[in-house]
Amino acid sequence: MTSGERMWLWAQPLLAVLAAVAGIAAWVVQALGAFAFLPSVQAVVTGTFVLPGLAVSLGINHLIVMARRPAVLTSGEKILLGVQVLIVVVTVLTSLDPAALIAGFLLWPLLIAAAVTACVTMAGTTLRMRRGEYAPVIEAGVSSAP
């Protein structure tokens, strides 16, 4: 496994930990009543539900991928992970604006759809690999998938 593949493999649990820490921080802020640190309704919802849910999703995805031999992400899975990161970054940035609640209503379902798609894709690929129906080609640090 190349260092690039290793980076992609461990990106999911790293992002899961970051999302979990941010979610726990939002819970603590709410418990302390320091709502000034959560500038909008979108920030409250994102911190309370979206980020912890993303952490669980990424953690499950990592466990699914670790059941593979070799434990590598396909190109499509890397794209799905990148899309999730992009959606989360935009969601968090728009959460800072109290007037941007509509962005949350649009982005939350999109993030859920991306997370479910990633999980189903990773589970399907893992099942095909374990059955011997699919084998990723890893050459010179590049993983390719059909």
Image: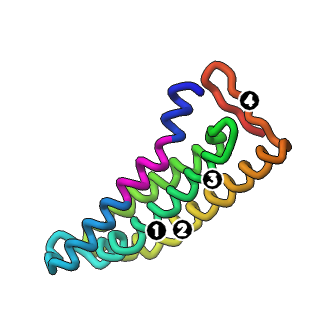
Q: Quadrant of residue 33?
A: bottom left
- Give the x, y percent position of residue 42: 33, 74
**Residue identified by numbered label 4:** 137
**Which numbered circle lies on residue 53?**
1
Disc nearest the viewer among 1 and 2: 1
> Disc 2 on helix, strand or loop?
helix
Disc nearest the viewer among 3 and 2: 3
Which segment did they paint magenta? 10-19
Quarter of the figure that contains the C terminus? top right
Indicate the amino acid at tag 4. Val
**Which numbered circle lies on residue 129?**
none
Q: Which badge, 4 or 3, is on the more N-terminal residue?
A: 3
* Numbered-mark total: 4
- Give the x, y percent position of residue 131: 83, 47
Q: Is residue 16 magenta?
A: yes
Q: Give me the residue at 44% from left, 61% from top.
A: 55
**Residue identified by numbered label 2:** 112
Indicate the amino acid at tag 3. Ile
Q: CA distance from mark 4 to mark 3?
A: 19 Å
Q: Is residue 51 magenta?
A: no
Q: Which badge, 2 or 4, is on the more N-terminal residue?
A: 2
Dot 4, crowdedness within 10 Å: few (<14), some or many (≥20)? few
